[in-house]
Amino acid sequence: METEKEQETTTTTSTRDETQKITKPKIAMLSVAAAVLIFLMAFSCYGCSYQVPAPLEPEEAKMSMDKLYNTQWELDTEEGTPSLSEMHDLVIDSIEFGLKTSDSEFIAADIFFTGKPMLSTLLGYREGYGFYFKNGTMEFPIKVAYSQSKDEQTETLTLIGNESNTHCYYLKK
């Protein structure tokens, strides 16, 4: 028969073996999880620059409009070539903003489509709604959002369909 001390040693050894068997897979899983987290943190900055802000206050909207004067924006085709059903599924390749109109609440804007003539519009701001395009008395059913990355290196213009909720991203040329 085994003595009490021998039983204690055997139990300790078997417990240690079981602990080592359990620990190695856990270490492997934790290593993979840590690598995934590091990867996500390293490459999440790209997604941060595409977050659409809430509607701006009038003062913020004026500052954003000032940044849009005389600028050109090109469709970001990184994830394909999106179109807005609100614009009859036409692909908007680029947008060019001019100077203030005689009515200082609007900026002249030219919208360029793939394979179609350009459309001259105005960009306006309405409190509680945000930026929008209009042509004469007709307002287009899309919202326009301007955003700038935290490091101020990337500016993004986002068109959002009111019905489809499709987002089309444009980068400053």
Image (cartoon, helix red, strand yellow):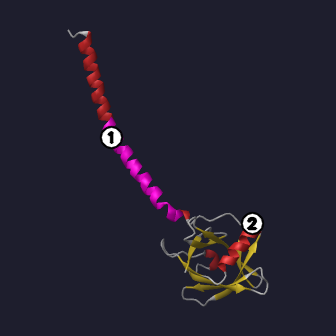
27 left or right of 147 in image:
left
Q: Residues within 10 Å of mark 2 (few under 14, many from 20)?
A: few
Seen from this angle, which residue lies furthest bottom? 117
Q: Is 83 left or right of 78, judged from the image as shown?
A: right
Q: Looking at the picture, does residue 72 appear above or below residue 44? A: below
Magenta stretch, overall SS: helix
- Magenta residues span 23-47
Q: Is residue 30 magenta?
A: yes
Question: How dense is the environment of label 1, judged by Cα within 10 Å: few (below 14), some, or many (20 and up)?
Answer: few
Q: Amino acid at mark 1?
A: Pro
Q: Which residue lies under the disc numbered 1?
A: 25
- What residue is drawn where x is 62% and y is 67%? 165
Q: Is residue 2 left or right of residue 168?
A: left
Gap between marks 2 and 1, in whole Å?
53 Å
Observer-side mark, 2 or 1, equals: 2
- Residue 36 pos. (x, y %): 41, 53
Apparent side of residue 111 relative to residue 11 in the rendered image (left or right): right
Query: What percent of the width, then of the height, locates residue 124?
Result: 73, 77
Residue drawn at x 63%, y 79% as measured from the top left:
87
Query: The disc labelled 2 sits on which kind of residue?
Result: Glu
Q: To which residue does mark 2 refer?
A: 57
Quarter of the C terminus within the rendering: bottom right
Front-most of 103 and 121? 103
Tag 2 secondary structure: loop
- Which secondary structure lies at badge 1? helix
Q: Say which quadrant the N terminus sits in.
A: top left
